[in-house]
Image (cartoon, rainbow, N blue to C red):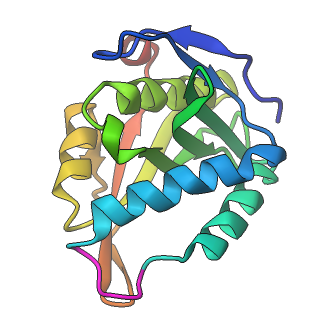
Amino acid sequence: MPGPSAHTYAAAVSLSPLDIVAPSAQDAAAIASILYRASAAAYTDIVPPGFLWNLEETLASCQRLLNDPTAIVLAAVSGNQWLGFSAVLVQDAGLGDAELRRLYVIPERWGEGIGNVLHDAALQSAQRVGATTASLWVLEKNKRARAFYEHRGWQLAASAGANEHGGVVEVQYERALVTSSLD
């Protein structure tokens, strides 16, 4: 699945331009650093000790993601600084469903609108390849993330229950991908 070309967006607070790019497999370390730092900051108080991946496991996960032909991975870059990334999986382009698998921003840039830009760019990319609905899983206790998604039109999935992994519960959200709400 071809990745999108680079686009420049204005983040809500940042004064510098924000480029949204499709990272390559060679960018796995930069993506892993974002995931590792953001996870550590966001999940420390809501997951048991030892639950989070170490940096080596995080890097391996990001390498798999960047090599996944069903994944559309986008990164927010300002100058030479990697600020965040999103990943949406589209299993069968044109058949309707996409999953927002990752959306992370480095903690020191939270609240600047970078997550908004990545969220919208990810859903627009999924829609461009034929997805009409999207789902995601979020930690039940991650109030910040849940509020973020609910503010953007995501609703708890009526048909899905919850997943439990190592004492941590995830809940599923879903939403339609409607052009007017994403443009």
Tell me residue 2's x, y (percent): 83, 30
Quarter-wise, where is residue 166 in the image? bottom left
Outermost residue toward the front in this view: 80
Range of magenta residues? 46-51
Q: Main secondary structure of the magenta part?
A: loop
> In the rendering, at what x and y percent does residue 87 appear?
59, 44
Q: Is residue 108 left or right of residue 56?
A: left
Across and down, in percent, residue 92 comes to 73, 45
- The question of residue 158 being in magenta is answered with no
Asked if residue 54 is positioned above or below residue 5 in the image, the reply reads below
Q: Relative to residue 106, is residue 126 depicted above or below?
A: above
Residue shown at 27%/71% (left/top)?
44
Is residue 83 in sight in this rendering? yes
Out of 127 and 167, give the one closest to the viewer: 167
**Looking at the figure, which quarter contains the N terminus?**
top right
Q: Which quadrant is the C terminus positioned in? A: top left
**Residue at position x 44%, y 57% in the image:** 37
Residue toward you, 129 or 46: 46
Is residue 177 in view from this perspective?
A: no
Identify the residue at image location x=31%, y=89%: 167
Q: Residue 63 or 16: which is nearer the viewer? A: 16
Estimate the x, y position of residue 113 in percent, counting from the top left. Answer: 32, 24
At x 66% / y 28%, what residue is drawn?
130
In the rendered picture of this protein, how many numbered marks are placed on residues? Answer: 0
* Residue 23 located left or right of residue 123: right
